[in-house]
Every structure is written in structure tokens, then in C-alpha cells.
Amino acid sequence: METVVSGIRSTGNLHLGNYFGAVKNFIKMQKEHNCFFFIADMHALTTHPKPGDFKNGVRSVMIEYLACGLDPEISTLFVQSDVPQIPELYLLFNMYAYVGELERCASFKEKIRKHPDNVNAGLLTYPVLMAADIIIHRATKVPVGKDQEQHLEMARNFVNRFNHLYGNDYFPEPTAFNFGEALVKVPGLDGTGKMGKSEGEGNAVFLNDAPEVIRKKVMRAVTDSGPSAANQPKTEPVQNLFSLMNLVSKKDTIQSFEDAWNNCTIRYGDMKKQLAEDIVTFVAPIQERMKEIASDEKYLKNTIEMGGEKARISAAKTLKDVREIIGFLNA
């Protein structure tokens, strides 16, 4: 059984892209592997969030992932800052990371380009903290997106550097978790690209959006002037709507609109109304579960505490071993 570690952002809400692109895989993964899912609140400090927003964001994200189906009895679901061994390992591994390689990191270059007034040390050493998150549980697999592949490669470099320096193979090399054909790319509502909050609020349908909000967003989705000939290829905006339907609608519903497209009788207004209602139906049970969890403070508190305890037990073993390997007197 592989040990898998995956970080969860601590700000913002989940949208359909998050759900179908990652969370569904997490739900399946937790039944097949030894999984550690953490809310990366220490990473979020690089943006200097306000304390109230920060705390509420972590709580909301925890509620949403629990509502989607992550099971704290099966996997270890915890808050990053509840595990003090992570920042200590982060400190230690900063000694094995070099300024030059950190400055060459693509994500660091992008951050300082977009936010030149906030080039803090946390942004520079972000890959080291990410490595600590992974190796504190001696993970072998990490679900990562394309934009995180360089960070994972750097984590392998740090691990190999440590193992070589101390003449051991204590840390395994973490590799990307391959979802294979199960990986789903969910398109946005703006006609191009994938669904994401960074593309604008109207591009994404969030799991906590009210029904009327979902309907307004979907009805504003980009389309085209319609097919001019039978069975012609779909344009990207229209294909995006069909792709969303394939995720939330019934097969006969999808087929009816496919037929309408192919014989040039499709009415985009009708299609978007149907898609909106199907999304509302799809997210309804998740929203109901979110309300139940949010109203049960005892359950939420116990879940967070249980996850933190499980994560600390795993992390403490790793840190003790690392201290002994390095040669600290009080390892």
C-alpha cells in the first residue's frame, strides 16, 4: 500500500472543477492507499490573510471536503499548522536547499512578477515547505497538477541530497500519483480553458452556490451562433457545455441535445436551463451535508483533533529518525 500525501488549499471554495478533477479521485484513493490530506494553512501565510478570514477559510474548506466524501476514519485529514513537526523539518531541509535553485523555480518567478510588493522569504522557500509536507510522512506518491511538477522534482532533489549526505536511503523518492484516464479536466463557463476561480467568479460553479446563482452563471455561459450544417464539429464554447452535461446530466438528456445539435435544431437557452437544473440537483446533497457538518461543532472539532493527532504520531516518528541521522544530541 502506497503512502499518499496531498495538500488542500485553505482559502476559497470548491467548484465543480475541483470536485471532478481531484476530490472524486481522493475519495477513491483513500480506500486503496494510506492517505494524508492536509489543509495547507501555513502556505497561505505568504499572502498575509486577515486572522478572521484565515480561520473561517480553513473551517470552510474542512467542511466542504468532509461533505464531498473524505472519510476521517479511513484517511488522515488534518490542518497543517496542527503538526509542529512540519515547520521543524522545513527548517532543517532549508539547510539542504540552495538559493539559486529556489530562485529559478517557475512559480517563484511568477509570484514576484504578479506581486512585486510582497516578495517574502516564504515565497522563495515554498518548495521546501512543500517537500516537508510530503516527506514528513515518508510519502511515495503525491497527486500534483502540471504547475506543481517542478516542486515535486525539487522535493526529490532535497531527499536525495539528504540521503547522500548522510549515507542512507531513509527517505523514499516521492513521485506523481498517476490517475490515468480517471483524470477529468472540467471546462469553465467563459468559453475557453478550464474551470477556475482565478479566471473570474463567473467562470466557475461553486459547490456552495445557491440555486439562483448557479442558474444565472450557467445562463451567461458563452455559446456561438449555432450549427449551420448537420453533424458539424462543435466549437469550444459549445463543447464545454456538453462536457459539463456529461458530468452531471442523464444520458438520455445528453443524447437529446446531441441529436438537436446534429440536426441543427438546438436551442442554447433550453440547453443551459437544463444544465443549470442538473447542476443544482447534483450539488444539492453535498450542500445538505455541508449544512449538517457546519451545524455540528462537536463533530467538526473532534474530526480536526483526531486528524491532527494521527498526523503528529506519523510526523514525530519521522522527525525523531531525522534528528538521529543528523546527529542531534537530544534526538
Image: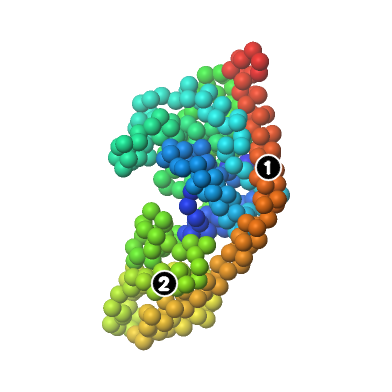
Q: Give the residue displayed 43% in from the left and 32% down from the top.
A: 122
- The colour scheme used here is rainbow
Q: Position of residue 244 (x, y in %)?
A: 46, 69
- Position above or below: 80 against 69: above
Residue type at numbered disc 2? Lys
Q: Position of residue 183 (x, y in %)?
A: 50, 57
Q: Give the residue displayed 58% in from the left and 69% down from the top.
A: 284
Left or right of 158: which side holds 292? right
Q: Residue furthest top?
A: 329
Residue type at numbered disc 1? Glu
The residue nearer to you, when weighing 210 against 100, is: 210
Res 330 → quadrant? top right
Quadrant for the C terminus in the image: top right
Q: Give the residue displayed 36% in from the left and 87% down from the top.
A: 265
- On the question of residue 27 being in view, the answer is no
Left or right of 304: which side holds 80? left
Q: Residue furthest front?
A: 52
Residue that mark 2 sits on: 216
Residue 305's mark? Answer: 1
Q: Position of residue 184 (x, y in %)?
A: 48, 59
